[in-house]
Image: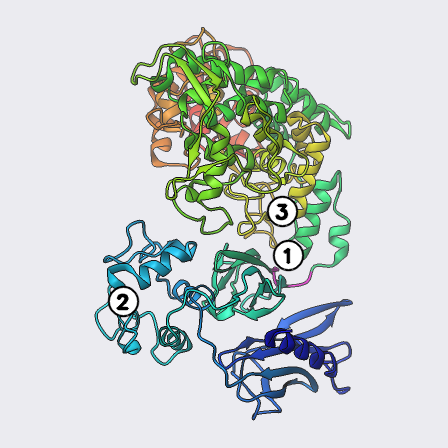
Amino acid sequence: MDRRVCAIALIVGVIAQLPAAGAPLPAGEAGAELRISPASFVLRGAGARQQVIVTGVRQLDGAGIEVDRTGEMSLRTETPSVLRVSAGGVVTPIADGIGVLVAEEDGLATRAFVLVVESHEAPAPSFEQDVEPVLARAGCDSGPCHGKARGQNGFQLSLLGFDPELDYRSLTMDLSGRRLNRMEPDRSLFLLKPTGAIPHGGGRRLDPNGPAYATLLHWIRGGSRRRRDGEVSLQGISVEPGERMLAPGATQQLIVTARYSDGSSRDVTHLAAFLSSESAVAAVNDAGLVKAGPIPGEAAVMARFLGRIATASIRIPLPGRVPHEVYAALPKKSFIDELVWKKLEKLGIVPTEPAGDATFIRRASIDVIGRLPSPADLLAFLADTASDKRERLVQRLLERPEYADHWASKWADLLRPNPYRVGIKAVLNLDAWLRMCFRENRPFDRFVRDIVTARGSTFERGPATIFRDRRSPDEIAPLVAQLFLGIRLECAKCHHHPFEAYGQEDFYGLAAFFARVGYKGASLSPPISGGEEVVFTAASGAVRHPITGVELAPKTLFGATPAIAPGRDPREALADWMLAEDNPYFARAAVNRVWAEVFGVGLVEPVDDLRATNPASNVELLDALAATFRRGGCDLKKLLRSILSSHVYGLASAPNARNTADTRNYSRHYRQRLRAEVLVDAVGDISGLPDAFDGMPPGSRAAEIWTHRTESISLDAFGRPDPNQDPPCQRTPDTSLVQALHLMNSRSFHEKITSDSGRIAALAACEKSPQEVVEQIYLLVYSRRPDATELARAVAHFDAPGASRRRVCEDLTWALLNTPEFVFKD
């Protein structure tokens, strides 16, 4: 047995015999205690260190509330000859022996025990284990510095240190190793520049009296070795605490621990990089100290060390206590309500009251079929007294033919290419295929498989057009991963993903599934690509690593890669893996996209960026929706019915005192501006005069348009994708000055409102009373009746001296169209 193994065995034996830590004194508050974490540990070597956390626990309503007390109390050592402890809780060795840490506060005390060994031995650092983390922590390998594509001032490092071999060569061999001075290590450029001893474009990055500088100097003096003899490999990292609730303004120290192949571990908090997903909710500094902001919510704090990532979930509840009975009394129509209420209770947020029936039918109609309810449908719904009328309304809407056009157009945004690039007929064919899929309610897994494995003529097989547009494996792979798995891979095309485990080998391994996509027929010839092309599975094809040149076999991003039988299209194996039960990303990405369309905010935002460092606002809900979606046969209508039938979906948008700041937890409905096609079609329905679109049959609605090349100033003003983009998929969801001016000054809208053949002229000419006319206009535009004040003010205009009944009707309609209540889905 070698010396290291013997030492580890001895350490384990000594630790096992240490007394238990955490002994509270009897004078403390009942149920209160202090804890030091870790309660026992080993410091091995002269440069060892360990961050500790002191946690105070007190009882509130039967639950233990944990508060970080590390930087706010007396933390000392009873063995000052063995170890020292800083005010921030960092423990370092002085001499071999058993050390004792003590924390005391308000009559409570607790202890932690430390075994210090080899305190005077300082083995030479290795590049990968010790030097690379210092470079990452100092920002030397970041994008703005030497980690950029061509490096900085002749010195190049891999981005975020994901290629240690390249970094070692750059540092020790490039330009004959001029950056290291082994005769006079402290005169090395590698040390002089980052300490500011000589001019450095990146400024002062190292303290010459700090431990990071000492590590680098020791490494050069020790021969600047690539690895130690028998060096262990990093297996992973963890962050403690993994989850914590903080009061506004409170702090929480994190500990990052690296685990190695020999079973050992060490504290790397001082070498890790930290990033918060929501800095306004919980910010984190370079030392891993989290500080809660004033805004209630949840944040994921990422810790990164040598390419490994771990996260801590930090939750900040709203100040003040809400009794459990408030949440227990809330309606629970399904698991959606239960899981939303559960999360709101953790945050101390109280949901708003349900929306009225008029608001609900307008909201549901827009979400399901993309149009306003007719006055007749609205009045029938308002008159219905059945308790299940909202559920029955949702079912009726899902059976309407407009459902297919509305939802197919959403996917057309993501998949439809520019017809000037791939050809008009090919794009028209793809658009028709998408609408057919939604008309027949094709299961979503089959829909995705049909796209991923598409073959055939672009004039006959709609999804083949996608492969006509995206022609190389490195173009189609990130599109498929992002749309159908919610995984953004573009970063990994050039370098290791900064927030995920994917690198270039993963990217091009996935791209290799598309290496055998073949083409015959008319190729692309923009701006007019009118010919037919056939997509087929070629007999051969390969993808090579862009740096090593090695041919890569098809490989999935995680899990086992399905076997690819001879003669089988590799894309079929990819689809098998994507749609398999044990691949959680497919169902999560699908339900998150639908949820975001309905609520305006996805459980994960952005909707196509699912990763550990960007967690869902309600992980349990996302997983439950995904599981339900799977069990329901990946039926999008069933999913929509489940969501729209929940109590959460029917909440009003007006905030209350305890949910004003909530924008991610669905304690109220979040208003959305009407989609461009919905708004244009709504104006046509209100006026009774639909738009006429070039290249479309008479009477076609905006939702039926097959290309964004169809001219429409109104659609452009309200944010439909720019047809000059490639692909044209980016919508503008925000409001703008252009939209306000368009509503007020659009010649098209003015002509619709003032037309002799329009609905407004017919209303003005009918025998209904002014009260009835005003009510009808409100039903058309707002999908509700006017209140008493609105009615009185509108009717007064009919009685004004010299008033024209038709002019009043036109002005009232125009005024209502120019309000947020019309432009937004409430």
Residue occupied by mark 3 = 667
Query: Foreground residue, 6 or 291?
Result: 6
In x, y percent, where is residue 821? 50, 33
Do we see residue 762 in this rendering?
A: yes
Residue farthest along the left direction in this orientation: 199
Category of crowding for the residue at label 3, using alpha-carbon neighbours closer than 10 angstroms: few (below 14), some (14–19), many (at least 20): many
Q: How many marks?
A: 3
The type of residue carrying mark 2 is Arg
Q: Quadrant of residue 386?
A: top right
Q: Residue at x 44, y 49 (%)?
A: 496
Query: Foreground residue, 207 or 748?
Result: 207
Q: Which mark is residue 179?
A: 2
The majority secondary structure of the magenta stretch comes to: loop
Query: Foreground residue, 400 or 314?
Result: 314
Q: Which mark is residue 347?
A: 1
Q: Nearer the viewer, mark 1 or mark 2?
A: 2
In x, y percent, where is residue 147? 34, 55
In x, y percent, where is residue 157? 34, 57
The type of residue carrying mark 3 is Ser
Whether label 3 touches label 2, CB < 8 Å = no
3D distance between C-alphas at marks 3 and 1: 11 Å
Q: Secondary structure at mark 3?
A: loop
Which of the two labelled residues, at mark 3 and mark 2, occupies the earlier sequence position?
A: 2
Q: Residue at x 59, y 68 (%)?
A: 265
Inspect the magenta stretch and tell me whether residue 320 lies in it. yes
Q: Nearer the viewer, mark 3 or mark 2?
A: 2
Left or right: where 824 falls relative to 187: right
